[in-house]
Amino acid sequence: MTEDLHVLFIEGYCQVSWMQNKYQTYKSLDGEPRFAHLHPFRVWCSDPEYLNDEGLPPDAFGVERGRQEIESGRYHAVIVLDYSDPDEVHRFEMDFGNLLQKFAAAGGVVAFPSSEGLIVSTLARLFDVEWKMASYSRITWAPSLDVNEANILDSFGKGKHSKEFIKEYSAKAVSMRSVPHHERCFGVTDRYMDYDDDSDDEEEERAPPQTNDANYESVVAMHAYGKGVIAYFGDVNAEDHTIVLVAAFVESRSPSHPIHCS
């Protein structure tokens, strides 16, 4: 893991303004906020009145400030947190599309934890991913070690306590299909269960998925772009496990030096 990492959070392109609070307050196994040692800097890029009054205030406001931070040469990674509002797709791509392309191409890490799979259209336009939106459900997900073990260990296993989280977990999310084997991180397995949110007692076991099936569903997927990498993390509720995976990905894949892309 690269020491002294700096991470920029781009926020505000969401449907409901709460997820950023969970990411900044979730505590790691050592009792410290999970992202605290990554020197997070948060920029809210939408109307400040949209913020939840009970939430943690961002460090700065405005699209222009967000652009300045990306161009500053301070950061190893950018986390676009809950880009999920379909009405904001055009604005987001105009605001940050070109800069994020440059940042990733120069070797940076760009992570997209999102509650809405429609953003895959943006990922396709900006980063040439082949992924397609699949389904929306709460199931048990597991690391795709059978087809992508080396990449998964390299991308999630070098962070703080991160190897302990390369395992099954439950989350309600929008998944992706048409994900190439070498880009799959976490997806459905032969222990594929569908959980009813209204009852903890009801489980429906489905037919085992086939790894060679183009419809195989991934909830976490990564894609190399230039010298860097981007990743999608599907999760409607910002589950603890997803937060840890995002942090582990940043820690494991960030370059040794901050990215200059101005």
Image (cartoon, rainbow, N blue to C red):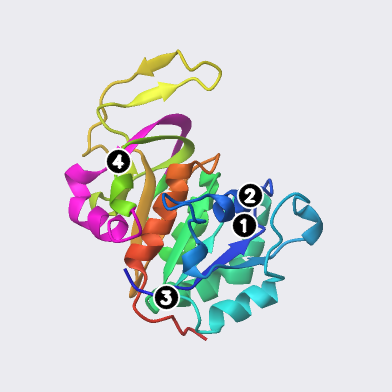
> Residue 218 lies in magenta, yes or no?
no
| Spatial separation of the CA atoms under disc 2 and disc 1 | 6 Å
| Spatial separation of the CA atoms under disc 3 and disc 4 | 27 Å
**Residue 213 at least partly seen:** yes
Q: Earlier in the sequence, mark 2 or mark 3?
A: 3
Could you tell me which secondary element the residue under label 4 belongs to? Answer: loop
With respect to residue 241, does 81 lie above or below?
below
Q: Which residue is located at x 29 percent, y 61 percent?
A: 158
17 and 251: which one is in front? Answer: 251
Could you tell me which secondary element the residue under label 1 belongs to? Answer: helix
Using residue 257 as the reference point, say whether residue 261 is left or right of it.
right
Location of the N terminus (image quadrant): bottom left
With respect to residue 197, does 148 lie above or below?
below
**Residue 215 at least partly seen:** no
132 and 237: which one is in front? Answer: 237
Residue tagged 2: 86
Q: Which residue is located at x 53 percent, y 75 percent?
A: 99
Residue tagged 4: 167
Residue tagged 1: 89
The reply to whether discs 2 and 1 touch (Cβ–Cβ < 8 Å) is yes
Residue tagged 3: 4
